[in-house]
C-alpha cells in the first residue's frame, strides 16, 4: 500500500486512477464515497474469517465494537450478505453430493469460535469481548439459528461475554445464558421464553419498548399532573392513581364511587384534586391523597364525556352526550 500510494511511475499512477479514490494532495487519498470504505472494511473482516490464524481473527474483529461505530450497519449488511451466499452454496453442495455433514459453514464456525473464546473470567480482555459481540451480532443478523445451536451444545452460550451486541429479534428460546454478560445490548423483539438468565448481566439492555402496566378493566382516559409525577387513570368504573417514585410508577389508591364507566379524568393544576366524568351522568371531585369525594355533581341527562378545570381550579367544565356543556363550582357542585 505504501508503494502504491507513493510511487510516481505511469503504471502506478494509472492504477491509482482506476481505484475509487480521490487525491487530497500529495500522497493523501480518500475514498470517493463512504460505501467504498464500508465495503473494504467488510471485505477485510471477511477475509480474516477465511484464514487459519484464529488469533489474527480475534485481533481484527475485536478492534472496535460494531455498535460503537455509526457506519457499521452497512458493514454488517455486507458481511451478512456474504454469510447468506456462503450458506446457499453450502446447501447446494450438500444436495448435489448427498452430504450428511453439518450444515454450518466455515464462516459460521469461525464466528462461533470467537463467541466461545469470551467465556470464562470477567476480566477477559476487551478485544476478546468485542470480537465475540461482533460475531454474535453478525450471526444473529444472518438469521443463524442460535436456539438450535444451544440444543446441539447446551452449554455453548453459558458465560459468554458479548456486551453491546445486537440481538434484536434473536431466537433464544430455552438458551442457557447463565452468567452471560449482555450489558448494553440491543434486545428488541428478542424471544427469551424458557431461557436461563441466572446471574446474567443485563445492565442497560435496550428492549426498545417501555415497560407496561396492566389494569383490571378498560382504560378510557388518563391524565398526567402538572408535576409529571402523578397519573390518574379512568379504568372501568374506578379512578386509579399512580405516583412516580425514583423514576418508577407505583400504584396508589383506587377511587370508587361511580356506578358506571369513568369516561374522563383530569388533575387540578395544584395537584390536590382530580375530577372525573362518567357514563352514570355525573361528575365527581376527588381528594388526590385521601380519595374522598363529596356528593356527585348531577344535572346531565346522558353520559359525561369530558371534564376540565379552570385555570384557577375554582370551576369545572363538563361536556355530555346530552349535547350540553355545564360549568360547576368546584367546591359546591352548583
Image: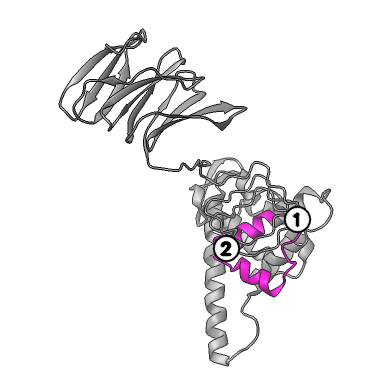
The image quadrant where one finds the N terminus is bottom right
Q: Does 285 sit left or right of 183 as displayed?
A: left
Is residue 140 in the magenta section?
yes
Which dot marks residue 59?
1
Can you name the residue that lies furthest to the left here?
323
Secondary structure at badge 1 equals helix
Q: Does 93 sit left or right of 197 as displayed?
A: left
Answer few, some or many: residues within 10 Å of disc 1's Cα (few below 14, many 20 plus, some between 14 and 19).
Answer: some
Residue 166 shows in the view:
yes
Region of the chain picked out in magenta, as a range: 133-158
**Above or below, 133 relative to 156:** above
Residue name at image x 82 percent, y 57 percent: 120
Q: Which residue is mark 2?
A: 171
Answer few, some or many: residues within 10 Å of disc 2's Cα (few below 14, many 20 plus, some between 14 and 19).
Answer: many
The image quadrant where one finds the C terminus is top left
Question: What is the quadrant of residue 178 in the picture?
Answer: bottom right
Residue name at image x 46 percent, y 16 percent: 271
Can you give x and y, in whole percent of width and height, for residue 283 in the image? 31, 23
Give the dominant element type of the magenta stretch: helix, strand or loop: helix
Can you give x and y, in whole percent of width and height, for residue 33 in the image? 48, 48
Which dot marks residue 185?
none
Residue name at image x 50 percent, y 57 percent: 18
Is residue 279 in the magenta section?
no
**Above or below, 86 relative to 141:** below
Q: For the residues marked 2 and 1, what is the alpha-carbon distance in whole angstroms?
A: 28 Å
Can you give x and y, in whole percent of width and height, for residue 54 in the image? 77, 65
Q: Nearer the viewer, residue 90 or 236?
A: 236
Residue 61 shows in the view:
no
Q: Nearer the viewer, residue 280 or 72?
A: 280
Q: Nearer the viewer, residue 306 or 124?
A: 306
Amino acid at each position: 500500500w505504501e508503494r502504491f500510494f507513493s510511487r510516481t511511475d505511469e503504471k502506478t499512477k494509472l492504477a491509482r486512477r482506476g481505484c475509487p479514490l480521490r487525491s487530497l494532495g500529495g500522497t493523501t487519498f480518500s475514498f470517493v464515497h463512504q460505501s467504498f470504505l464500508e465495503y473494504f472494511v467488510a471485505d477485510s473482516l471477511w477475509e480474516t474469517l477465511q484464514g487459519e490464524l484464529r488469533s489474527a481473527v480475534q485481533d481484527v474483529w475485536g478492534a472496535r465494537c460494531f455498535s460503537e461505530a455509526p457506519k457499521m450497519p452497512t458493514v454488517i449488511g455486507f458481511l451478512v450478505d456474504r454469510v447468506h451466499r456462503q450458506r446457499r452454496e453450502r446447501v447446494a453442495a450438500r444436495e448435489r453430493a448427498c452430504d450428511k455433514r453439518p450444515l454450518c459453514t466455515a464462516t459460521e464456525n469461525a464466528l462461533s469460535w470467537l463467541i466461545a473464546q469470551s467465556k470464562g473470567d470477567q476480566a477477559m480482555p476487551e478485544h476478546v469481548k468485542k470480537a465475540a459481540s461482533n460475531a454474535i451480532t453478525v450471526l444473529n443478523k444472518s438469521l443463524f439459528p442460535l436456539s438450535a445451536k444451544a440444543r446441539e451444545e447446551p452449554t455453548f452460550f453459558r458465560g459468554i461475554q458479548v456486551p453491546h451486541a445486537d440481538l434484536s429479534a434473536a431466537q433464544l428460546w430455552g438458551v442457557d445464558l447463565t452468567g452471560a454478560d449482555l450489558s448494553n445490548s440491543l434486545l428488541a423483539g428478542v424471544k427469551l421464553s424458557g431461557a436461563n438468565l441466572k446471574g446474567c448481566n443485563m445492565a442497560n439492555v435496550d428492549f426498545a419498548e417501555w415497560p407496561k402496566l396492566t389494569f383490571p378493566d378498560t382504560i378510557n382516559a388518563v391524565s398526567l399532573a402538572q408535576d409529571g409525577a402523578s397519573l390518574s387513570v379512568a379504568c372501568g368504573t374506578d379512578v386509579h392513581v399512580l405516583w412516580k417514585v425514583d423514576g418508577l410508577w407505583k400504584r396508589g389508591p383506587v377511587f370508587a364511587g361511580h356506578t358506571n364507566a369513568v369516561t374522563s379524568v383530569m388533575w387540578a393544576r395544584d395537584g390536590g384534586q382530580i375530577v372525573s366524568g362518567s357514563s352514570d351522568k355525573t361528575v365527581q371531585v376527588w381528594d388526590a391523597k385521601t380519595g374522598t369525594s363529596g356528593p356527585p355533581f348531577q344535572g346531565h341527562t346522558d353520559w359525561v364525556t369530558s371534564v376540565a378545570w379552570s385555570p384557577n381550579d375554582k370551576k369545572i367544565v363538563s361536556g355530555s352526550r346530552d349535547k350540553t356543556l355545564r360549568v360547576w363550582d368546584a367546591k359546591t357542585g352548583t
